[in-house]
Structure formats: structure tokens, C-alpha cells
């Protein structure tokens, strides 16, 4: 069990995409430390199974499941409203949700699916839950990133990948967008006691996302996934998220990128471009429909 002076037995944690893979292992690991864990997923059967396993294995019965399909921004809003009205305490938000799409798809709201689920969904959820997090500060936000962001740049002329769609390029661009806005939020919080950091889990070979990518991807695409990244089980891959959510050391920094060995490392040069970050923030605010309810951080 990880030792920490930031007593997780007093913390409430929300983990999105927590019914399987890295998200489940993150929820399990934090529940084992004594946290009250709220798991969010889109399937009720998987949610019930995940909570039952966590409670049985950890003995922690203070864990619950909320059904929400976070590919739809309307569902993100519903979830944020539910959490904000039904829970008085929230100390950690782990934006673990992610997906890749072999062919270009659009959500019911007309957004390119990879951009919606990998960036706009956590961006919106984070902004909507910031008041609750600040009310329970010190608080933490953990955004699960991906090594693939290193191959990306932001194509503002075709942000929704309408032309020449490529699965890896769309996914990597969405992850870079989320990383840019993570750093931008760290700057905007301006020493408020809310720390936001990015966790690179490496490659978890036993997750649905990795299996789908390896089965469907081209050889070059598969090689790009693994070059420079490390391959783990989902339990091992969850360590960087658990570290950022629970460790004493993570109280000392914000706006950082932590690799699969729980070390602060540099992300891509493109991810530190503040002018691009500001532009991505503005475009994301518009696409996510953030209006007066968006805090002026």
C-alpha cells in the first residue's frame, strides 16, 4: 500500500471510465487506500461488476457507480450537475475516459468522436466541477494522457478531422489538445490549492482500447504506438494516475507530466506553446458550449 500523508481515507475521488482497464485499476488502487471512490461508466452491468469486485477485494464499501455516456456532452453536464448537487465533497477528479475510432464517427451532437471523448468531455467536466473541487481544496485533477501526443500538432483548420481521417492522428491531436488545456488551467488557477497534472500510463496491453488499436491498426500505426512507450498490464499502467491522486509528493507540483515510472518528465515541445494553448482553450470553450457557468479562472 502506498504511504501518504494526504490521507485518502478522508478523500472522495471521481474516476471516469472506471469500469475496466486502467480506470478500473485506478479506482481499485484508490479504494484500497481508503478513498470514497465514485466510478463513472456507460454500462450499468460493468459498473455493478466493477464496484462489487472493488468492495470484495478491498473491503471498502464506500464506493459507488454512476452511469453516464461521456461521449455526449449533455451527459457530461448531467453528471456534473448530479455530482455537484448530491455530493458535498470531491477532492480528486481522475479524467481517465478515452477511446479510439478506426473510422471517423460523430456524436449525436455533431462532434468528431475522438475529439469529443478524449478532450472535450474531460475539459467540460473539469470546468463544471471546479467550484466543488475548490470548495474542498486542497484538491487534485489528474488527466490521463498518452505518449502519442508527441506525434501531434493542432490542426485548427480541420480540428474535427473531416478531411483524410486517420485514427492515430485524430487520437493524438485530441490528447495534445487536452494536455495544452491542462497546462493552461494550471496557469489560470494561479496558485489556488487545486493541482492539475497529466499521467502517462504507457501502453496497457490488456485494455479494450489497446487491443482494438492493435487489431485494427496498420503496421506503421502499431509501431508508432509502441515507439518510446512502455507496455504494461493495466494494473501497472494505473500507477501514474494513482501516484498523482494520492502521493504526498504530488502536493508539491502542478502543470506537470508524469510518466509511467511516476517521474516528472517533459512532454512534447508543442504542448508548452502558450499561444496555442490559449487558442485551443477558446475553441474548446465554444465547442463544449461553456457559457456563464464557466468559472473565470
Image (tube, rainbow, N blue to C red):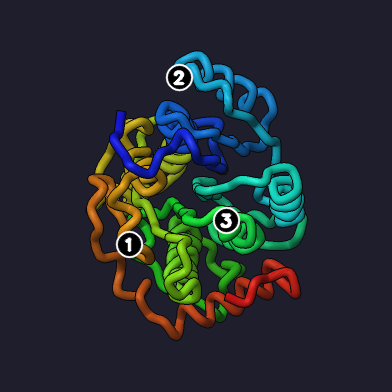
| Mark 2 secondary-structure assignment | helix
Mark 2 closeness class: few <14, some 14–19, many ≥20 residues within 10 Å:
some
Decide which of tag 1 and tag 3 comes sooner along the chain. Answer: 3
Residue at 46 percent across and 63 percent down: it is: 193
Quadrant where the image shows the N terminus: top left
- The percent coordinates of residue 289 (x first, y second) are 73, 69
Q: Is residue 269 left or right of residue 279?
A: left
64 in relation to 274, above or below: above
Query: Would you say the residues marked 2 and 1 are in contact, meaning their CB atoms lie under 8 Å apart?
Result: no
Nearest the eye: 107 or 27? 27
Q: Determine contact: label 2, label 3, CB under 8 Å.
A: no
Q: Are marks 1 and 3 in contact (CB under 8 Å)?
A: no
Query: Is residue 207 in view?
Result: no
From the image, tell me which residue sits under label 3.
Answer: 133
Q: Secondary structure at mark 3?
A: helix
Which residue is more in the foreground, 130 or 68? Answer: 130
Q: How far across and down, in percent of the image, does residue 296 sit? A: 62, 77
Q: Is residue 132 above or below residue 97?
A: below
Label 2, on which residue?
58
Number of other residues with Cα within 10 Å of mark 3, as a class: few under 14, some 14 to 19, many 20 or more: many
Q: CA distance from mark 2 to mark 1?
A: 29 Å
Residue for badge 1: 253
Expressed as whole percent of the image width and height from the top left, the position of residue 148 reads 36, 57
Of 287 and 256, nearer the camera is 256
Comes first in the chain, label 2 or label 1: 2
Q: State which quadrant residue 6 falls in.
A: top left
Distance CA(mark 1)–CA(mark 3): 17 Å
Amino acid at each position: 500500500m502506498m504511504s501518504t500523508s494526504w490521507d485518502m481515507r478522508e478523500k472522495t475521488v471521481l474516476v471516469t471510465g472506471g469500469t475496466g482497464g486502467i480506470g478500473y485499476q485506478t479506482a481499485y488502487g484508490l479504494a484500497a487506500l481508503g478513498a470514497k471512490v465514485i466510478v463513472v461508466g456507460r454500462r450499468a452491468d460493468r459498473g455493478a461488476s466493477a464496484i462489487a469486485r472493488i468492495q470484495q477485494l478491498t473491503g471498502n464499501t464506500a464506493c459507488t457507480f454512476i452511469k453516464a455516456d461521456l461521449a455526449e456532452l449533455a451527459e457530461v453536464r448531467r453528471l456534473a450537475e448530479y455530482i455537484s448537487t448530491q455530493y458535498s465533497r470531491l477532492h480528486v477528479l481522475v479524467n481517465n475516459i478515452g477511446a479510439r475510432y478506426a473510422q471517423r464517427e460523430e456524436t449525436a451532437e455533431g462532434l468528431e468522436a475522438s475529439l469529443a471523448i478524449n478532450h472535450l468531455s474531460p475539459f467540460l467536466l473539469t470546468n463544471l466541477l471546479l467550484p466543488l473541487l475548490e470548495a474542498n481544496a486542497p484538491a487534485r485533477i489528474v488527466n490521463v494522457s498518452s505518449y502519442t501526443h508527441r506525434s501531434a500538432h493542432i490542426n485548427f483548420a480541420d480540428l474535427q478531422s473531416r478531411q483524410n481521417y486517420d485514427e492515430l492522428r485524430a487520437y493524438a491531436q485530441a490528447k495534445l489538445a487536452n494536455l495544452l488545456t491542462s497546462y493552461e488551467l494550471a496557469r489560470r488557477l494561479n496558485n489556488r490549492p487545486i493541482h492539475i497534472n497529466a499521467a502517462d500510463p504507457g501502453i496497457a496491453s490488456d485494455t479494450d482500447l489497446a487491443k482494438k488499436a492493435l487489431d485494427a491498426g496498420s503496421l506503421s500505426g502499431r509501431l508508432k504506438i509502441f515507439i518510446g512507450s512502455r507496455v504494461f498490464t493495466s494494473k501497472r499502467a494505473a500507477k501514474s494516475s494513482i501516484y498523482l491522486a494520492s502521493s504526498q509528493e504530488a502536493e508539491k507540483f502542478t502543470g506537470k507530466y508524469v510518466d509511467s515510472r511516476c517521474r516528472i518528465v517533459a512532454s512534447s515541445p508543442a504542448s508548452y506553446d502558450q499561444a496555442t494553448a490559449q487558442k485551443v482553450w477558446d475553441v474548446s470553450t465554444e465547442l463544449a458550449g461553456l457559457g456563464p457557468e464557466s468559472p473565470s479562472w
